[in-house]
Image (cartoon, helix red, strand yellow):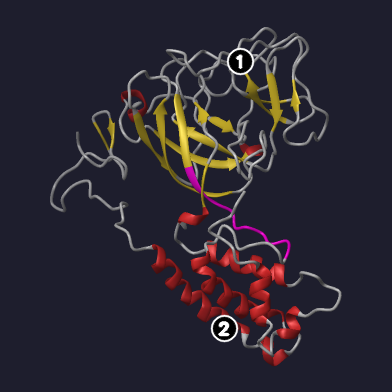
Amino acid sequence: MIQTQSTVTLQKIVNIAMTFADIEPVLNVAGQSSNPATIIATDVMNAICGVNFPHKWNEINLPVFYTNSWQQDYAVIWPSPQSSGSPYTAYSTLTNLAWLERGIVVDINSTSFPKPYRNVEVGRQLPQATSTSWNSGTTGGNPLFLVNFFPNNTLYYGTWGALNNGTSSLGNNPTAGSVYTNPLGTGSMPNNPITQIQDANGNYLLLTTYGTEGISAPLAAANAAAGTQVSGSGATTVWTVVDPWGQGFRIFPPPSETGTVWEFNLTGQAQPVRFTSLGQTLFPLPDQFETNFRMGFIAQCYRYSPEAKTRAKFKDEWQLWLASLNELRAKQDRELEENMFVPERSIMGGGSGNLRGRVWRGPAWPWNY
């Protein structure tokens, strides 16, 4: 992947920092080819990404997923084939999401052009639910869904061959002969079993090829590597192991048994990049922010000095640099802000709460239509 926006290497930053006599010994460590420079650079990148501001250069478009009958939780993987130059391996688990920013859902099977869409609201936590009873979800208002992410090992997974317990999102298990119909191109959402299960060895499996289940459950070896693909005996379906510490999603409300197939298109902030070599560029940080990174790198070097007097400078230098991150934000924050607060009612007026009639009223849909 050609990193055209980031051409400055960590080695260049180190070369500049070593011209400072009091911190040159920090970087010129005998027997060390890259440490502590890579550690310091990682500290600085974490601080830059830690500001309360969504950096455009650090955004990632997440793997899409599709609503499935009664299913509230969705593990995801990067699809195959990947686009040319993509940094992600096909069928690898999403593992670098730091937080969600925004998203929409698209009526993917609609023959209308352009295809209908609705907003979603992203947040930190959603409870598990077993009902589709949700005002906007039943009327098509905005936002249509709430969504947040969780580690894969905290999502809900079905159990192959287990009896369904009668609730909507807890159950719906596959068994011998279960048919999984591809939701793309169908008129209405097919009545599929849950598309993610935990096998007998504790692996988390995600359906990646639609078809018919065989006479036995899919089973991967204990502690199978993420990306491992398995099928049950006689099955035409394929299941892929996902990393238990990767990221997946929970939506609210859970979809109904059939209906519209919604494609989730979400955008989030990536986790801060980790530095492993001096030849590594500052990617994804654009070259225009090299100055800000270099200043933070030099400030952080004082922390690792073996000299007490030099190390004492770190506290003031680092705090000055953290304050200077306002400059980095200002470089990016020159456009009209589309996010805003809209009051539900006047100060003296009445109101009936956030739900009025059958339409959700919140930041994404504040109007009383």
- Of the residues under marks 1 and 2, which one precedes in the sequence? 1
Where does the image place residue 220, in percent across and percent down from the top left? Answer: 79, 26
The residue segment tinted magenta is: 267-277
Disc ID at residue 182:
none
Where does the image place residue 233, in percent across and percent down from the top left? Answer: 78, 12
Foreground of the two, 295 or 104: 295
Foreground of the two, 97 or 369: 97
Disc ID at residue 164:
1
Query: Is 189 situated above or below 103?
Result: above
In terms of secondary structure, where does tag 2 sit?
helix
Disc ID at residue 317:
2
Side of 327 where 47 appears, left or right: right
Q: Amino acid at mark 1?
A: Asn
Foreground of the two, 295 or 51: 295
- Assign the magenta stretch its main secondary structure: loop
State the residue at coordinates (60%, 23%): 195
